[in-house]
Image: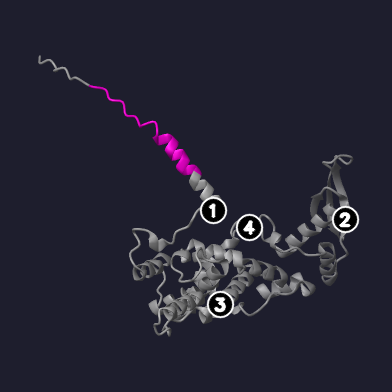
Amino acid sequence: MNELSAINVISKRNFKPRWVAPTLREIKRRKDVEDDRNGGPKIFHRSTFLEWLNYDAEIFAFSNRLGEKFNEATLRTALTHKSYVERETARLSDMGVDSYLQIQNNEELSVAGGEMISKFTNGYLRAVFTQVPEELITAMHDFLTSTSNLETVGKHIGLGDLMLCSDFPCESETYVKSLKAVVAALAESSGEERARIFVQDLVVTQLYGLDINELWNPSDPVGNLTDILKREGKAEPEFRLIKHSGQNSVLAVYYVGVYSDKNFIAEGAGESLEIAKEMAAREALKQLFHTEDSMKALPFGRQLKNIQTKIVQLENQPNLTLSKWISEKVTSAVH
């Protein structure tokens, strides 16, 4: 039997010189001081990275990431802000070069895209929330088309790396204008139907997971409930104390039920009788409008295929206002 030959193993300790750790700590400290002085770490544009190819390739990749077909010239216009054209014109003028540039900005596309986003959003909300008053539709619409929400959508689809503008990091209004212009560019390139689906997939989906009742704050829920019951020929709401706990403590809670014609409608809880009464009225309105916490999840994607025609029809047809809301009219309108 052959014996294994002995192998001499020489252990070697890997260590760094003593000056490395203190130097790295000092570099980190200086960087933190510089970031604090500048209001945060410096952000570099995507074009400064080594893997940046060229603008044409990035435009092509952007279209394919979204899964949409754009006219390249229209998409370039949608991503060109007015400030960029003004900056380039001034730069060429300072160099003594003819300052007339054959570059269009996205102002017109932004206006058209904003109108489309508003129209498409209203159509979806009215088709899905058929039994809510127009005031709640308006509240959801205003949330979805707000600057902060559209800016979030624009950042998540990578507009910040492609927009041509004079400011960097880009301002919120620049993101919003570019996103609206992209919607209009898609409508011109692939048709309004593709733009509608684009808005439904990216903008309207921001409602997912939110309590829509928190977006609308009626000033007088008790009065609103009373008016609705009167229009439906029912007795005025009657509020009764169901139970309470910790009445003489800072953790007091009251449960109030709301009844009409001796029929229980809803109940609410609060730290005082007035608050509990208001919460009970809000819960009753939720049941009337079918916006309870247990409501079905909002439909998106393929689930909207069968109601796209209905969405188009309701884009310019508002729901009943709160002052005219009656469950019978809503039911007849739905069916």
Q: Where residue 218 sits in the image (x, y, percent)?
A: 77, 64
The answer to whether residue 232 is magenta is no
Q: Which residue is mark 4?
A: 210
Which callout, 3 or 4, points at the residue further toward the start of the chain? 3
Residue corresponding to mark 3: 116
Which of the two discs, 1 and 4, labels the residue nearer the N terminus? 1
CA gap between label 3 and label 4 equals: 23 Å
Secondary structure type for disc 4: loop
Taking depth in this image into account, of 89 and 331 the one nearest to the observer is 89
Q: Which residue does the numbered mark 1 point to in the structure image?
A: 40
List x then y, in percent, for residue 242: 85, 47
Q: Which secondary structure, mark 3? A: helix
Q: CA distance from mark 3 to mark 1?
A: 37 Å
In whole angstroms, how far apart are the C-alphas of marks 1 and 4? Answer: 31 Å
Q: Residues within 10 Å of mark 1 (few under 14, many from 20)?
A: few
* Mark sitting earlier along the chain (2/4): 4
Position of the C terminus, as image quadrant, is bottom right
Mark 2 residue type: Phe
Query: As displayed, is residue 123 above or below residue 297?
Result: below
Looking at numbered disc 1 in the image, what kind of residue is underneath it?
Gly
Q: Mark 1 or mark 3, which is nearer the start of the sequence? A: 1
The residue nearer to you, when weighing 266 against 88, is 88
What residue appears at the point 71 percent right and 72 percent down from the top-left corner? 134
Residue at (67%, 61%) from the top-left corner?
212
Q: CA distance from mark 1 to mark 2?
A: 54 Å
Q: Residue at x 51, y 77 (%)?
A: 82
In the picture, the disc for residue 239 is 2
Could you tell me residue 65's position as x and y percent?
40, 64
Q: Which image quadrant: the N terminus?
A: top left
Q: Is residue 329 left or right of residue 20?
A: right
Q: Magenta residues?
A: 10-29
**Which class describes the residues within 10 Å of circle 2: few (<14), some (14-19), or many (20+)?**
many
